[in-house]
């Protein structure tokens, strides 16, 4: 099941192009993924073709800090609170958010969870896989940044574990896979495949031989689904995107290292 793209010209996101998760999260849970349009960034951080108007939300990817600040201001203006931005390092640490984000305060983590209504969680990506989580009764949410390093090291399992710590034992956790690089565009070396096989021999089915010796085409979506299943998450929606090929909507680090970042956001409404 794939996400649906929506050009949101009115409430609740006031003109920001967004991908809205198509998943069975209950009504208190809201979320979306920003696209390239709706901001003031230019050049590589702008729209397709380096046109001005990019909504780059990454503060560490070379864009003008003033433009990033205005882009974040525009995003925050249509959210219930300032997002909890993370300083992502391709690790497995999970931040437990008990309050809204503060300017300049970015916990070092690659995932966040909360059970507090009104707290907006965010992860930034441009090929890596964003994964949103929700309890089936809307009591907790989570967001994770999962590139191949994070997936292999267990960032999704750690996120599920942190969510379950906020929930009753019988809670059902749901997941949605947002826009990441597709298998046909994601060539990796033997070391990446071996990193996954070491912890899960069955993960070999997520790799197809590449055009060059020692190279493989890795399916991040399949790898994420395997990891989530092992963590007890059996309702997983989304997938089917490719940031590398869809240059109109998404930035892609592999397509062009200089460029912006999309934000995947989730929260529980008050």
Image (cartoon, rainbow, N blue to C red):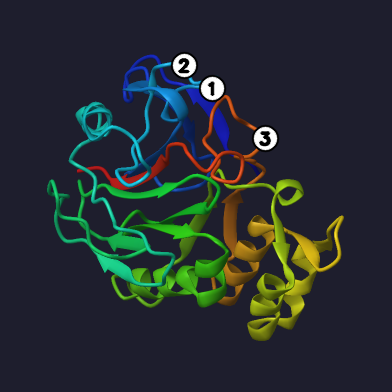
- At mark 1, the secondary structure is loop
Count residues near mark 1 (Cα–Cα under 10 Å), then give few for <14, some for 14-19, many for 20+: some
Viewer-closest of 219 and 59: 59
Q: Are marks 3 and 1 in contact (CB under 8 Å)?
A: no
Discs 1, 2 touching: Cβ within 8 Å: yes
Q: Is residue 136 visible?
A: no
Residue to which mark 1 is pinned: 48
Direction from residue 145 to residue 255 in the image, left or right: right
Say whether residue 148 is left or right of residue 64. right
Q: Secondary structure at mark 2?
A: loop
Residue 210 visible: yes
Residue 163 placed where, x, y %? 35, 68
Residues at marks 3 and 1, CA–CA distance in whole angstroms: 12 Å
On screen, residue 109 versus residue 173, left or right, reads left
**Crowd band around label 2 with a 10 angstrom C-alpha radius: few (<14), some (14–19), many (20+):** some
**Can you identify the residue that label 3 sits on?**
245
Q: Which mark is residue 193?
A: none
- Residue at point 58%, 47% (across, down): 180
Q: Position of residue 132 (x, y in %)?
A: 44, 53
Q: Quadrant of the N terminus?
A: top right
Q: Residues within 10 Å of mark 3 (few under 14, many from 20)?
A: some
Q: Nearer the viewer, mark 2 or mark 3?
A: 2
- List the single residue furthest toward the bottom: 198
The residue indicated by pointer 2 is 51
| Chain-order first, disc 2 or disc 3 | 2
- Using the image, determine if residue 166 lies above or below residue 64: below
* Disc 2 to disc 3, C-alpha distance: 18 Å
Q: Nearer the viewer, residue 124 or 113?
A: 124
Q: Quadrant of the C terminus?
A: top left
């Amino acid at each position: 099941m794939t996400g649906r793209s929506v050009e949101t010209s009115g409430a609740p996101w006031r003109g920001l192009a967004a991908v809205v998760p198509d998943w069975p999260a209950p009504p208190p849970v809201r979320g979306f993924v920003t696209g390239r349009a709706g901001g003031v960034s230019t050049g590589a951080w702008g729209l397709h073709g380096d046109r001005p108007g990019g909504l780059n939300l990454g503060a560490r990817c070379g864009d003008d800090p003033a433009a990033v600040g205005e882009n974040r201001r525009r995003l925050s203006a249509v959210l219930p609170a300032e997002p909890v931005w993370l300083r992502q390092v391709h690790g497995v640490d999970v931040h437990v958010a008990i309050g809204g984000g503060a300017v300049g305060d970015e916990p070092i983590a690659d995932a966040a969870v909360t059970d507090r209504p009104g707290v907006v969680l965010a992860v930034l990506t441009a090929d890596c896989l964003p994964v949103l989580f929700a309890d089936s009764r809307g009591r907790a949410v989570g967001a994770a940044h999962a590139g191949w390093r994070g997936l292999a090291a267990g960032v999704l399992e750690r996120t599920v574990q942190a969510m379950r710590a906020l929930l009753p034992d019988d809670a059902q956790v749901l997941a949605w896979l947002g826009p990441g690089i597709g298998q046909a565009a994601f060539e990796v070396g033997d070391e990446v495949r071996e990193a996954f096989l070491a912890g899960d021999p069955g993960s070999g089915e997520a790799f197809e031989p590449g055009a060059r010796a020692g190279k493989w085409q890795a399916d991040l979506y399949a790898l994420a689904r395997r990891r989530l299943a092992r963590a007890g998450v059996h309702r997983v929606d989304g997938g089917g995107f490719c940031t590398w090929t869809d240059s109109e909507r998404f930035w892609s680090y592999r397509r062009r290292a200089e460029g912006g970042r999309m934000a995947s956001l989730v929260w529980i409404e008050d």
